[in-house]
Amino acid sequence: MVAVAALAGCGASPSGGPHRTDVAASRVPSPEALSASPDDSTSPSGSPSSASSPASAKPSTSKTQSTAAAPPAGANYAARLPKFDQPPKADKVHLPEGASAAYFSRIPTDQPVAFITIDDGQIKRPEAYELIKQAGVPVTLFLMIDAIRNDPAYFKRLQDAGAVIEAHTVTHQNLKGKSYAVQRRELCDSADKLGQWYGRRPVLFRPPYGEKDDTTLKAAHDCGLHAGFFWKETVDKGIVRYQSGNTVQRGDIILMHFRDRFVDDYIAALQAIKAAGLTPALLEDYIP
């Protein structure tokens, strides 16, 4: 049974804006141990964004875990994975002309699809490769350079399993209010390094904490990044939290992170999409 609870401020922005508030959550029970890690849904100061959420700090390489060993022998998640039809042929979104990247929290589409995105990369669970491979659904990784530089090969395995890798800055600092030079360096250097490591230079990005300004979108455009992304749902400890209502909507972008309970979070996102009668689709298919 899925339990729904009222929550406040799970995705609160550093400025406390109401657009960052999750108001409902659905829980997927799990026997796995609880664990917290830094993420984009907390403020850069590291203060907790909700009374129901554990305190978490700004991402730090000192907290990075490297567990790129092969997945457990015989790991099989079939019983927990919902089945989906192939997503429809994507209707490309219109990107505004000009010298700025586009920015979305939801893809403007009437097609019955939603999008799974996974951020950062500090915690590298060995189960992720087998899980993504067995699920066989599209997923986009927004990777932060300082979180993954100790083990880029881990994410090459996930790329081989079908994940697409995009940019999430070098150091995970809040870009909003920073100079053009700082923002360009964070975005361009991130895209350049990921291109070197994974054979494809990113064309999409997510600003840390979802915070951006006009300079961010200008710098992103100048770095060859076409669009940036916020989110409509977050997932942590097997719980999907919604900004509005209690179901995933068409075009919604779901945010999760590389955390200790990666398996539960990934399956919870899939189950929420299935319960809404939608199919996971790939962001990159919708962006010209």
Image (tube, rainbow, N blue to C red):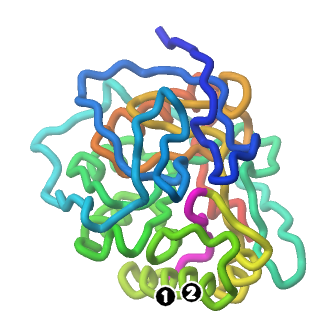
Q: Which residues are magenta?
A: 201-209
Measure the C-alpha gap from mark 2 to mark 1.
Answer: 6 Å
Q: Amino acid at mark 2?
A: Cys
Q: Which residue is mark 1?
A: 192
* Quarter residue 50 falls in: top right
Q: What residue occupies the far left of the structure in this picture?
A: 73
* Residue 128 within the magenta-colored segment of the rendering: no
Q: Which residue is mark 2?
A: 188
Question: Helix, strand, or loop for circle 1?
Answer: helix
Q: Quadrant of the C terminus?
A: bottom right
In front of the other: 190 or 247: 190
Horizontal side of 278 relative to 261 (left or right) equals right
Horizontal side of 265 relative to 34 (left or right) equals right
* Residue ID at (50%, 87%): 189
Horizontal and vertical percent position of residue 88: 68, 46
Question: Helix, strand, or loop for circle 2?
Answer: helix
Q: What residue occupies the far top of the structure in this picture?
A: 1
* Quarter residue 229 falls in: bottom right
In front of the other: 79 or 201: 201
* Quarter residue 28 falls in: top left
Horizontal and vertical percent position of residue 8: 63, 28
Q: Is residue 237 above or below residue 118?
A: above
Q: Do residues under tags 2 and 1 come within 8 Å of each other at their CB atoms?
A: yes
Near mark 1 (Cα within 10 A), the count class, few <14, some 14-19 or many ≥20, is: some
Q: Amino acid at mark 1?
A: Asp
* Residue ID at (26%, 56%): 124
In front of the other: 62 or 107: 62
Horizontal and vertical percent position of residue 5: 57, 16
Q: Is residue 82 above or below residue 216?
A: above
* Residue 208 within the magenta-colored segment of the rendering: yes
